[in-house]
Amino acid sequence: EVLFQLSVQNDCRSMLCSVTGTRAVIQEQKTTERTTQYIEHTDDKRFVINMHALHNTNSIRTLLPRNLTKPIPLHSDRKKWHHDIATSLQTTQTEK
């Protein structure tokens, strides 16, 4: 039984995937002599779900354990981080 659809992406950041592949460019259904690089994934078992871009986030949250859907703060002290950024921008603006 399918409950909903979602889009997943490889977790390249954690798995350290890199641009190591090369393939021919196809133009108008013909292979050309040009090539393009692409990312070769190191693991096809670890994926990321962007919970902020989905229309069915609540459905996903009901099925996944909380530790997988809990927001993770980017900075431990958000107010301090904002203050530091503002101070550095004010200094930069003053120098201009």
Image: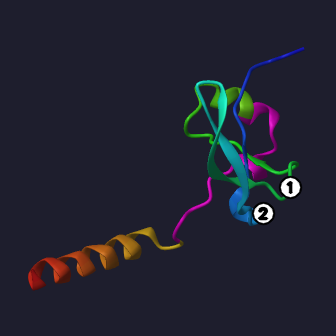
Region rendered in magenta: 61-75
Q: What residue sits 32% from the left and 75% below the top?
A: 85
Which numbered circle lies on residue 16? none
Q: From the viewer's perspective, tell me whether residue 54 is left or right of residue 10.
A: left
Q: Residue 73: horizontal and vertical position, in percent?
A: 56, 62
- Is 73 situated above or below 60? below
Q: What residue sits 35% from the left and 70% below the top?
A: 82
User: What's the amino acid at mark 1?
Assistant: Asp
Q: From the viewer's perspective, tell me whether residue 37 is left or right of residue 83.
A: right
Q: What residue sits 73% from the left and 32% below the top?
A: 60
- Is 15 situated above or below 29? below
Q: In the structure shown, which secondary structural element does the residue marked by tag 1 occupy? A: loop
Q: Residue 55: horizontal and vertical position, in percent?
A: 58, 25
Q: Residue furthest front?
A: 33
Q: Which residue is mark 2?
A: 15
User: What's the amino acid at mark 2?
Assistant: Met
In which quadrant is the C terminus drawn?
bottom left
Q: Counting residues from the N terminus, which is met first, the one under dot 1 or under dot 2?
A: 2
Q: What residue sits 76% from the left and 49% below the top?
A: 68
Q: Which residue is mark 1?
A: 43
Circles 1 and 2, Cβ within 8 Å, touching? The answer is yes
Please tell me how crowded label 1 is: few (under 14), some (14-19), or many (20+) other residues with Cα within 10 Å: few
Per the image, is 57 magenta?
no
Q: Residue 44 versus residue 76: which sits nearer the camera?
A: 44
